Image (cartoon, helix red, strand yellow):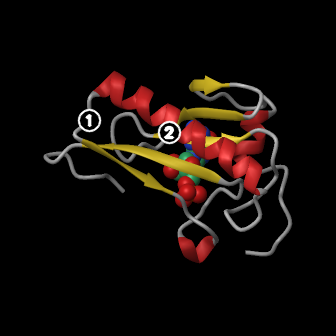
Amino acid sequence: LHAAYDPSNIFAKILRGEIPAVKVWEDDGVLAFMDVFPQSEGHVLVISKTSTARNLLEVEPETLATLTAAVQRTARAVVGALSPEGFSIMQFNGEAGGQTVFHLHVHIIPRWADRPMKG
Ligand code: 5GP
């Protein structure tokens, strides 16, 4: 949990425009984009553009507030677009916590009762 931020992580590359992403929302503070290996239709990731926090423990409260507001706004948009029956918000910290990309991010995963999550 305490290693240094690695600027070559995949989300940093997306933020620098070095690799493509399907963006669903972007402003000065945040970027929301489609997960390339979706757990369900409409799986979106939301990240801060201004913070190099690797996980929830490192992020400044003000940045977290901005990120959380973006998660809510994006979830509204996803629900509006896809009309899921529910959605799951997931956020993993550390390798043992299930994290694979070490730039803080929040998952928005639309859910349907008859469609189990993949992966
Ligand atoms: P976590 O670190 O919370 O386990 O999840 C990282 C997420 O990033 C995974 O759901 C994975 O599918 C997604 N991911 C990994 N590489 C890329 C990529 O290059 N582009 C996009 N859009 N998503 C990615």
Residue at 21 percent across and 43 percent down: it is: 112
Give SS at disc 1.
loop
Tell how many labels: 2
Give SS at disc 2.
helix
Where's the N terminus, which quadrant?
bottom right
- Horizontal and vertical percent position of residue 26: 66, 25
Q: Quadrant of residue 15?
A: top right
Residues 66 and 103: in front is 66
Determine crowd level at label 1: few under 14, some 14-19, many 20+ residues with C-alpha closer than 10 A: some
| Left or right of residue 54, residue 90 in this image | left
Return the residue at label 1: 84
Tell me if the residue at label 1 has its CB under 8 Å from ligand 1. Answer: no
Determine crowd level at label 2: few under 14, some 14-19, many 20+ residues with C-alpha closer than 10 A: few
Residue at 53 percent across and 59 percent down: it is: 91
- Is 90 placed above or below 41 here? below
Residues 16 and 46: in front is 46
Residue at 50 percent across and 48 percent down: it is: 107
Q: Residue lying furthest left in this view? A: 114
| Left or right of residue 113, residue 24 in this image | right
- Report how far apart the C-alphas of labels 2 and 1 lie in the structure: 15 Å
**Any mark on residue 72, and which?**
2
- Horizontal and vertical percent position of residue 2: 79, 75
Q: Which of marks 2 and 1 is in front?
A: 2
Q: In which quarter of the image is residue 19?
A: top right
Residues 25 and 67: in front is 67
Residues 86 and 7: in front is 86
Identified by mark 2, the residue type is Gln
- Horizontal and vertical percent position of residue 88: 37, 51
Where's the C terminus, which quadrant?
bottom left
Identified by mark 1, the residue type is Pro
- Check contact, mark 2 vs mark 1: CB within 8 A: no
- Horizontal and vertical percent position of residue 102: 70, 58
